[in-house]
Amino acid sequence: MDPGPPALPGGFVDPYVGSMKRLVILGGGTGGTIMANRLRSEYAEEALSITVVDQDDHHVYQPGLLFVPFGLADPEEISRTRHRQFHKGIDFQRAEVDRVDIDLDRVYLADGTTLDYDVLIVATGARLVPEETEGLLGEGWMEKVFTFYTPEGAAALAEALEGFDGGRLVINIVDMPIKCPVAPLEFSFLADWYFTQRGIRDQVELVYVTPLDGAFTKPVASATLAGLLEEKGVELVTEFNTGEVDGAGGRLIGYDEREVPFDLLVTIPVHSGAEYVGRSPGLGDDLDFVPTDERTLQSKVRPNIFAIGDATSVPASKAGSVTHFEGETLTENVRRFLAGRDLEPGFDGHANCFIETGFHKALLIDFNYDTEPLPGRFPGAAGPLQLLRESRLNHLGKLMFQWIYWHVLLPGHEMPGIGSDMTLSGKHTEETP
């Protein structure tokens, strides 16, 4: 008797053995690497070809950029070659993407090469577009106006902080969404620690300027974080929509004509999706992010296009933990799509972030689409990590995460004891104070 096509892990039957399908992944960062490695482990090369495209061969551990300005990390130590992060049997092509034709199922590369696909995953993240803010790249850029969201900017800011002996240091989020929404807060907390260590904290005025109506997007966490800012002597300026940066005069100018003076500005510029998305009719929205179903991660533009991580339009944080949790749902749904099955609406918006607060402490938040960060324990009631409370163990957890990133997350392994779905176990809700 014919046993039929071989079963995949989890009981799914792969109907395409002997009829290879083509998967193209645009972007070799966190999301692209996780998906390539997970799906390579699921399918034989004869069943599914996997091609990853990225414009360079440098994979940066982006959470590490936060530490560079304070001399706690070196840009070279948080960067590795992309192609070495992929499992055997994955074709990595270093090239710029010119555009995607979603009607022809074809990717056009800048060198004239074309790649046809049966399934496309967009994983090209978010990019900084400082040119969108008047004056930001003008006089003062990389002199007294910096960003730590790039390796070059973080390294230049390290030199600027080293020579900063006092004055008004402003941390400004120009607009949302941004990568790692807690990173600007972390910078504020570390700046408080840094200048205290140098013995000049009383000579430095720290100001945190945000377009939000509070320190963070979620009420409970926002109150906790605003309290920490106040405790550390950081002024909080809310609902400030930056319209112009006057580098020469040292002024942030809001659309409502409010002004915030600075001697040194740390800016988080406007973010958008990859440029090629804008050159690909029908693929992206006005900000060049890919309209994506928030539960299945299938694009809303074509059924054979999926998106992951910062490239999506889903209303979750643009953070590495979100990408990791999305990976499980997306792996399942690519398999289901190839098998002709209904997709699983499995992603719940789970996000989980260590927030460095200085003085060798950090707090931890864990939330999803429906549940905001709550106090308690993590990963469950008996978990060792405290939620929404500073601890040295949380700080050590943040430091340890870099090893986990390279050796567990990128290779596509699961985190023991931490599922992709957020759990209420250990969290203090109104019903279980």
Image (cartoon, helix red, strand yellow):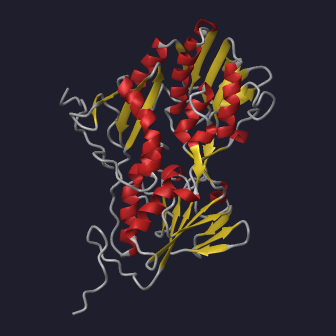
Residue at 43% across, 78% down = 47
Q: Position of residue 412 (x, y in %)?
A: 41, 56
Q: How many numbered circles does the render carry?
A: 0
Let me know if residue 296 appears in the view.
Answer: no
Residue that extends furthest to the bottom in the rendered view of this protein: 1
Q: Is residue 364 above or below residue 100?
A: above
Which one is nearer the viewer's eye here, 142 or 294? 142
Residue 78 horizontal side relative to residue 130, left or right:
left
Residue at 36% across, 63% down = 332
Which one is nearer the viewer's eye here, 301 or 421? 421
Q: Position of residue 430 (x, y in %)?
A: 22, 29
Residue 291 horizontal side relative to residue 385, left or right:
right
Locate the C terminus and report the quarter of the image it occupies. top left
Residue 19, image quadrant: bottom left
Residue 431 horizontal side relative to residue 390, left or right:
left
Q: Position of residue 431 (x, y in %)?
A: 18, 31
Q: Is residue 58 above or below residue 242?
A: below
